[in-house]
Image (cartoon, rainbow, N blue to C red):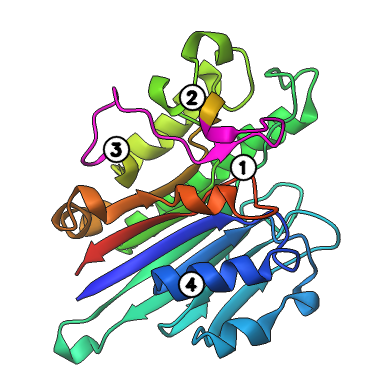
Amino acid sequence: MDIKLASWNINSVRLRIDQVIRFLDEEKPDVLGLQEIKCETDKFPYEPFREAGYNYIEVAGMKGYHGAATVSKLPMERLPTSFCPLDHARHVSTRVVAGDMSKGGMDFEFHNFYIPAGGDEADRTVNDKFGHKLDFIDNMKGYFTERFAKGDDQQVLVGDFNIAPHENDVWNHKQLLKVVSHTPLEVELLKTLQDTHDFTDTARLHRTDDEKIYSWWSYRAKDVFASNRGRRLDHIWVSPALHDAAVAAGRDGFKVHLDCRVWEKPSDHAPITQVLKL
């Protein structure tokens, strides 16, 4: 069976609810992780998602900013997790049941992250926001170490990681080496998280590092694709147990939905999707 996963930093779910529903109608993902929903949990627009067929909804909201939500056509249950040192609403972790277990279906954990941006200075001694970002990623590493030790190896990580790891995940590698989101320290820390647990970055699974991939473009650009000064801040990773399922989906199994970035009053991020052939 095919499972389609999606991730989108929507930059206010209430402001862009029509766009989200349009995306769900056109792309029909089974599970969607939203970041930066910018609303409290009780203010989340539950009904439009239910009307669209997404009856399973888990939200971590807070007033004014941050926030994450996962909506699913498939049954899922919330997992008790804590990653953010400042207790911001920056993640939703769930267990998703994909198909009838007695007929070859399986379940997997779906971790939806909005990793802190980290401020402007890549130095935690003068920038608490940068230290917060590094600590958040360290907490992720510790959590997955525990999960794998317990045999829970069917893991999916999605979200706005606020790090563009490869040289061709940014429009200009040399110019951005000192810019938070592409500094060597951040890139190395994210790589350590990935390598420690052998996660597959599905965007690069069927693409070489020479190919440019972006998912975010600044609002400052009048024509985002003419200048194309993008960064790949949004990610979908899978654990080794799901690696073959991502491989089987082929190159087209992963996609950045560029058209969404130029819809009227869009998010500065484009959604990404990954198909798993379970």
Please tell me whether mark 3 or mark 2 is closer to you in this view.
Answer: 2
Provide the residue designation for mark 3.
204
What kind of residue is marked 4? Answer: Leu
Please tell me whether mark 4 or mark 2 is closer to you in this view.
Answer: 4
Q: Earlier in the sequence, mark 3 or mark 2?
A: 2
Provide the residue designation for mark 2.
170
Provide the residue designation for mark 4.
24
Q: Nearer the viewer, residue 176 or 263?
A: 263
Q: Is 85 positioned to the left or the right of 159 in the image? A: right
Q: Is residue 163 visible?
A: no
What kind of residue is marked 3? Answer: Arg
Q: Earlier in the sequence, mark 4 or mark 2?
A: 4
Please say if the residues under marks 1 and 2 sit with CB atoms less than 8 Å apart: no
Q: Nearer the viewer, residue 32 or 215?
A: 215
Please say if the residues under marks 4 and 2 sit with CB atoms less than 8 Å apart: no
At 53% from the left edge and 49% from the top edge, which residue is drawn? 270
Mark linked to residue 136: 1
Instruction: Name the element at disc 2.
Output: loop
Q: Residues within 10 Å of mark 1 (few under 14, many from 20)?
A: some
What kind of residue is marked 2? Answer: Val
At 48% from the left edge and 24% from the top edge, which residue is drawn? 170
Whole-angstrom CA distance, mark 3 to mark 4, is 24 Å
Please tell me whether mark 3 or mark 4 is closer to you in this view.
Answer: 4
Instruction: Name the element at disc 1.
Output: helix
Whole-angstrom CA distance, mark 3 to mark 2, is 14 Å
Span colored in magenta: 204-225
* Dominant secondary structure (helix, strand or loop) of the stretch shown in magenta: loop
